[in-house]
Image (cartoon, grey):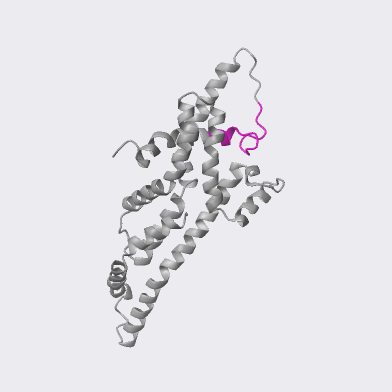
């Protein structure tokens, strides 16, 4: 795989970006986490203590990096829909959790590749080349990711958290703080994932109902319907190329 692959680029600059973004959210004057925190350290040790605090915040954000990556990307919707598929089939632990999470991660890399590439071009590479400061890099890096989240966030969910934050109604998206956008994006993703999961369940529920009715009509009530319906659900899923349809629906749902 060449170095220009989106997957390699993701691992190259995703973690530095997430760390920078997390620091920006935590340290932002508009952030709820930073509210009410005042430090008076004296002039003689200001620079040394400031560096120590930056390192402390960086280590804290790095420990939160997996959660940040999952909550601020397409991962949440993808993993929930894939879980619905497994539950609808009734195959218990097949595919295994490791396979499900791995597929969800690589689909996330695929969906987020254009956003990561834009962040890399406009923010990460200039910052690594010392062309812009950390603050400028953060401001430039937030733009593509916020655009992605705004496209997937419902207005109703955004209004909910704007109201809970007790802030004035923003006139433009630029006025919406990131700490308000993130939870609105997450609950929008949850709703979309459950809507897709409901659509996935319908054909398999029909099969279960037909099998259960047939077994009751011929008096075989002691035979578990799941044992009979499972092969038919697997056959239907294979015949319609179910994984192809599910992945196609997931990827196109972010367009």
Q: Is residue 83 above or below residue 135?
A: below
Residue 77 placement, left or right of 219: right
Residue 141 placement, left or right of 88: right
Q: Nearer the viewer, residue 144 or 191?
A: 144
Q: Nearer the viewer, residue 202 or 128?
A: 128
Most common secondary structure along the magenta stretch: loop
Q: Residue 94 magenta-drawn?
A: no
Residue 224 placement, left or right of 59: left
Query: Residue visible at 41% across and 66% down?
Result: 200
Q: Quadrant of residue 248?
A: bottom left
Instruction: Look at the image and tell me whether residue 173 can be seen.
Output: yes
Q: Nearer the viewer, residue 182 or 122?
A: 122
Q: Is residue 117 above or below residue 246?
A: above
The quarter of the picture where the N terminus appears is top left
Q: Residue 35 magenta-drawn?
A: yes
Q: Nearer the viewer, residue 157 or 144?
A: 144
Magenta segment: 22-38
Q: Is residue 85 above or below residue 39?
A: below
Residue 228 placement, left or right of 108: left
Instruction: Look at the image and tell me whether residue 61 can be seen.
Output: no
Q: Is residue 193 above or below residue 48?
A: below
Query: Residue visible at 48% across and 42% down?
Result: 68
Where residue 182 sits: x, y (%)?
56, 46
In this view, which residue lies farthest toward the top?
A: 44
Where residue 134 sits: x, y (%)?
53, 28
Query: What is the number of callouts on the image?
Result: 0
Query: Residue visible at 42% across and 34% down?
Result: 13
Where residue 244 sits: x, y (%)?
33, 61
């Amino acid at each position: 795989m060449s170095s220009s692959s989106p997957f390699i680029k993701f691992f190259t600059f995703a973690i530095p970006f997430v760390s920078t973004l997390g620091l920006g959210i935590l340290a932002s004057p508009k952030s709820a986490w930073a509210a009410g925190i005042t430090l008076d350290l004296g002039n003689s040790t200001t620079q040394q203590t400031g560096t120590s605090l930056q390192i402390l915040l960086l280590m804290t954000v790095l420990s939160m990096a997996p959660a940040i990556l999952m909550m601020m990307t397409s991962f949440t919707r993808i993993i929930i829909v894939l879980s619905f598929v497994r539950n609808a089939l009734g195959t218990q632990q097949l595919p295994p959790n490791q396979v499900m999470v791995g597929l969800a991660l690589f689909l996330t890399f695929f969906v987020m590749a254009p956003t990561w590439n834009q962040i890399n071009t406009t923010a990460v590479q200039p910052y690594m080349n010392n062309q812009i400061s950390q603050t400028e890099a953060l401001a430039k890096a937030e733009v593509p990711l916020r655009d992605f989240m705004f496209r997937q966030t419902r207005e109703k969910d955004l209004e909910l958290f704007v109201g809970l934050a007790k802030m004035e109604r923003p006139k433009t998206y630029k006025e919406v703080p990131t700490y308000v956008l993130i939870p609105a994006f997450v609950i929008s993703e949850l709703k979309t994932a459950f809507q897709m999961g409901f659509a996935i369940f319908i054909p398999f529920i029909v099969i279960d109902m037909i099998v259960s009715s047939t077994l009751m009509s011929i008096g075989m009530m002691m035979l578990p319907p799941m044992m009979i319906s499972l092969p038919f659900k697997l056959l239907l899923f294979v015949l319609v190329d179910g994984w192809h349809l599910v992945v196609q629906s997931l990827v196109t749902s972010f367009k």
